Amino acid sequence: MEVNVNHVLDAKGLACPMPIVKTKKEIDQIEPGQVIEIQATDQGSTADLKAWAENTGHQYLGTKEEGDVLKHYVRKSSEEDTTETKHQDVLELENLKDRLEGDEQITILDVREPAEYAFGHIPGSINIPLGELEDRSEELNQDDDIHVICRTGNRSDLAAQKLSGKGFSSVKNVVPGMKDWDGPVNQNH
């Protein structure tokens, strides 16, 4: 199946959040209704782009795998359809560390990919990658105080919105994310 595209974006070799950051910039360069092909090698980019498109009103068309390259296809929506939303309840990284040191009863949900999680995560955190959250959200208690974290705060923002939309009552997006975390870390690789 040949996909007609209006613009190709090379995001190969880039890790989260860069494929999304570059896509946000590039999609502004095309007209509504046109299709952009995002070429990426980051395995997490499929879930990231799908969630981002859903969050911004653009249409995620699908992904084709060609060797190590993932070709993602997104159709640009009209201006009135593309208001990006952000999760309202945000917690700074330092405040999370304070809560952990204060022995508060909280659930930390790490939505990074398993490989990212294996090389360093907050002790006691639960790993459910963003792309699996829809199918695995029942593993979480809807009444728990859930703090969602990823590498930079982008995937966790999308995950926090998704959980709130499913009826979870206390969900916080932790920013900026694990890239700036200087607290205790477990590794299991």
Image (spheres, grey):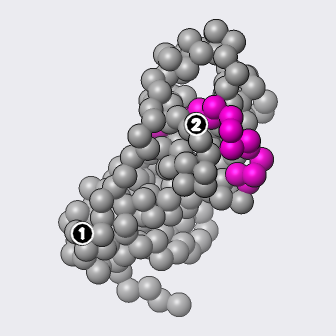
Q: Decide if residue 84 is on the left or right side of residue 109.
A: left
User: x and y percent of residue 28 in the render?
Assistant: 23, 63
Instruction: Name the one closer to the observer, 50 or 85.
Output: 85
Q: In the shown orientation, is residue 33 left or right of residue 122?
A: left
Instruction: In the rendered view, tell whether residue 164 sits above or below residue 77.
Output: above
Mark 2: secondary structure: strand
One can see residue 119 in this view: no
Q: Earlier in the sequence, mark 2 or mark 1?
A: 1
Amino acid on which disc 1 is placed? Glu
Residue 49 is left or right of residue 122, and the answer is: left
Q: Quadrant of residue 69?
A: bottom right
Q: Nearer the viewer, residue 162 or 114?
A: 162
Task: Tell me residue 137's x, y (percent).
Answer: 70, 51
Instruction: Report how far apart the C-alphas of labels 2 and 1 lie in the structure.
Output: 30 Å
Q: Which residue is mark 1?
A: 80
What percent of the width, then of the height, locates residue 186?
73, 22
Q: Which residue is mark 2?
A: 170
Residue depicted at x 68% and y 56%: 132
Decide: few, some or many residues near mark 1? Use Cα within 10 Å; few <14, some 14-19, many ≥20: few
Q: Is residue 59 above or below residue 107?
A: below
- Residue 149 part of the magenta segment: yes
Instruction: Residue 78: give x, y in percent of width and height.
Output: 25, 74
- What residue is shown at x 55% (from left), y 20% (from top)? 96
* Magenta highlight on residue 70: no
Residue at 59% in and 62% down: 68
- The magenta stretch is 136-154
Above or below 146: residue 19: below
* Amino acid on which disc 2 is placed: Ser
Q: Nearer the viewer, mark 2 or mark 1?
A: 2
Asked if one can make out residue 143 in the rendered structure from this viewpoint, the answer is: yes
Indicate whether 185 appears above or below 145: above
